[in-house]
Image: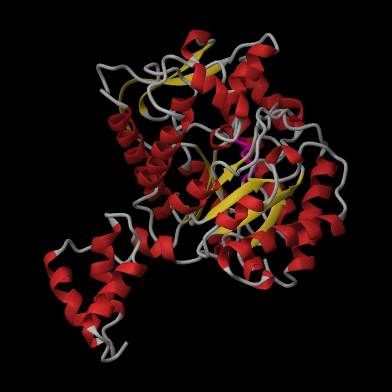
Amino acid sequence: MRGADPNKCRRLLFHIGTPHPTSLPVLLNIRPIVCLKGYHVLQILLLPFAICGPRIPVQSTLTMASNLHRDPPFRAEHLGSLLRPDNLLQTRADLDNGKTQQEQLTNIEDTSVKDVVDTQVKLGFHPISDGEYRRHMFWGTFFPGLEGFKEIKNPDVDIFRMYMPDIAAFTESGHKPGESVICTGKIKHVGSTYVDQWDYLKSIVPKERVHECKITLAAPEWYHMRYKEGRAYPKDVYPSDKEYFADIAKAYQTELQILYDNGLRNVQIDDPNLAYFCSEKMLEGWKKDPLNTKTTDQTLDEYIDFYNDCISKRPADMHVGVHICRGNFVNSRHFSEGGYDRVAKKLFQDMHVNTYYLEYDTPRAGGFEPLKSLPKNKNVILGVITSKFPEMEDMEEMKKRVYEAADFVAEGNNQTRQEALQRLGVSPQCGFASHSAGNSVKKHDMVNKLTLVRELADSIWPGEP
């Protein structure tokens, strides 16, 4: 570009920049710094903007959106939740029934976390988690820990969209949701409910491996999508979704910064809700609901913008992925079905995460064709091994499936299979215990499955973590 036509330089600059308006000042600020040596035309064109515009750190959404983040994610992954030992489950039940003290439960949690970390290390896994052993459900305590939210027992079913797959599954079987969390006032982050869990985890792994460890977080729209139009928050507190989403996003930004300051570099957001947009049954229910003022397409667009706001201030070296599955409840139950086809382009290209952890263990998740929409700067972890049942998959068949997925990624990006494989990894389709009771597997089944994940990764990417 030395001596190039200034107009061509200007066109090239704006072509390589992201179209999102907030990324423009970032591009204008960074480019003079990155391109000073030898690129005088670009420097002259951009310095006035850099001087006049706001100064934005190099840790920016542009940097994060344009760079491929590796290690994390890793070639062999698991999704965070692991089977709890019986004594941990019993002690938590005793605490709920007033038969023991919190100190006793904490001691058993500490011992159990140490044991499951040791298991992960022995099996050769790098994205180490605490198994979600201090949680009852996979979504944890983020929302109940915010000012302005209240956990309610035995909520009135009239507040729910009854066609949401998880809500429908409860009611169709004669049950109703046992608990939920709802906004009752102005939302504010008043302290992390995760940082103590994280601090303990990082204290029991070698210092050089802390950046690999992973924490899972709840999806930001979790307590919005399930509620009927107008029931997610009081109208005298928030006039619209825009203001409600903005305060939740501020809380996520604060939470992520607290965790980052304490050493966390690897975050996975668990979101079965996004798979609901693939469910014909849910989409039909939405259309028939007279209360809805937006289409599902409009709602998905707003949720993606909401996500992007939540993670917009994360530092560039913090990896964020989103896990999408179709439900993983007691007795290995799933809630929804449908391929990624109708949402792939928006999810893969518009959401500013680094990695997608996708369920792919059964035909209910559809084929790999949607992966053609995966950009070159994003990773996908293929959940081709089921955590729901003990039967073991065939190694060679799993390798064929991974290569098939890679071929679709390659086709969508004009790459070779080998180039596409550099952005892939493998995992179970979901955790082993999204609910504390766990799936229909035993500990040795879980170990066998995780061993298979590691061996599958080693057979495709030998020597890589």
Estimate the x, y position of residue 199 in percent, counting from the top left. 50, 48
Indicate the quadrant containing the C terminus: top left, top right, bottom left or bottom right.
bottom right
Please tell me which residue lies in front, 354 or 134. 354
Q: Is residue 76 visible?
A: no
Q: x and y percent of residue 33 in the render?
A: 26, 77
Residue plotted at (30% across, 68% down)? 14
Residue 232: quadrant of the picture = top left
Could you say where residue 186 lies in the image, as x and y percent from the top left? 28, 25
Total labels drawn: 0
Q: Residue at x 82, y 35 (%)?
A: 441
Is the image coloured rainbow, by chain, by secondary structure, or in one colour?
A: secondary structure
Name the quadrant of the N terminus: bottom left
Which is nearer the eye, 390 or 152? 390
Residue 135 appears in the rendering: yes
Q: Is residue 303 above or below residue 456?
A: above
In this rendering, would 246 be left or right of 255? left
Q: Is 90 one of the magenta-colored residues? A: no
Image spot of residue 304 (x, y percent):
43, 42
Looking at the image, residue 39 sits to the left or right of residue 191; the answer is left
Tell me the chief SS of the magenta region. loop
Q: Over which residues does the magenta segment extend?
A: 130-134
Residue placed at 74% from the left, 51% from the top?
Answer: 119
